Amino acid sequence: FKHTLAILQAICKECSRVLLAEPERIKYLKKMRHPRTDVLARAAMLKKIVAACKKNYVCPHCHRLNGVVKKISGVTTLKIVHERYTGRRMEDELEGLLELTHDAARINQDLANLVTPPANSAARGPRGGGGGGGAPPP
């Protein structure tokens, strides 16, 4: 589980490449492929690679923003989430996505019905449940 999380934190979620610039990637690749590198040195090098990849939030290959990869605690199964639109750097991308969604909703009325919530859903809360016994209000 720990290794899966480390790998997901080191790759781009758009193009699936390592979040390292090409010269840096080649440098680490040569060191990892060297036949005299022992297991402990490779493990330490892997930690350095993951730490360097965590610092890069923009992919050097496709130039897309990558969010945070976290594990969900409190559950018995393997749960990993990619929070793409959280953080200070992601606000511009989120605003662009919302603007595109609203533009599409203005053009397509069927999409507008799906995107914009009904007027009375704000009173029910984010999950849509009123907290009552399930009977509709009078």
Image: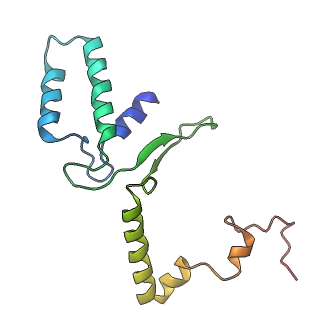
**Percent position of residue 31, x then y:** 15, 21
Residue found 64% across the figure and 37% down from its top: 74
The quarter holding residue 39 reads top left
Q: Say left or right for 19 vs 84.
A: left
Residue found 32% across the figure and 47% down from its top: 57
Q: Say left or right for 115 vs 24.
A: right
Number of marks: 0
Quarter of the image with the C terminus is: bottom right
Residues 107 and 54: in front is 54
Q: Say left or right for 44 vs 105.
A: left
Residue found 85% across the figure and 79% down from its top: 137
Q: Considering only vertical position in the picture, is 110 above or below 53? A: below
Q: Considering only vertical position in the picture, is 74 above or below 64? A: above
**Percent position of residue 2, x then y:** 45, 29
Q: Considering only vertical position in the picture, is 59 above or below 105? A: above
**Percent position of residue 35, x then y:** 14, 14
Its colouring scheme is rainbow
Q: Say left or right for 127 vs 33.
A: right
Q: Residue furthest front?
A: 88
**Percent position of residue 52, x then y:** 28, 34
Residue found 12% across the figure and 25% down from its top: 30
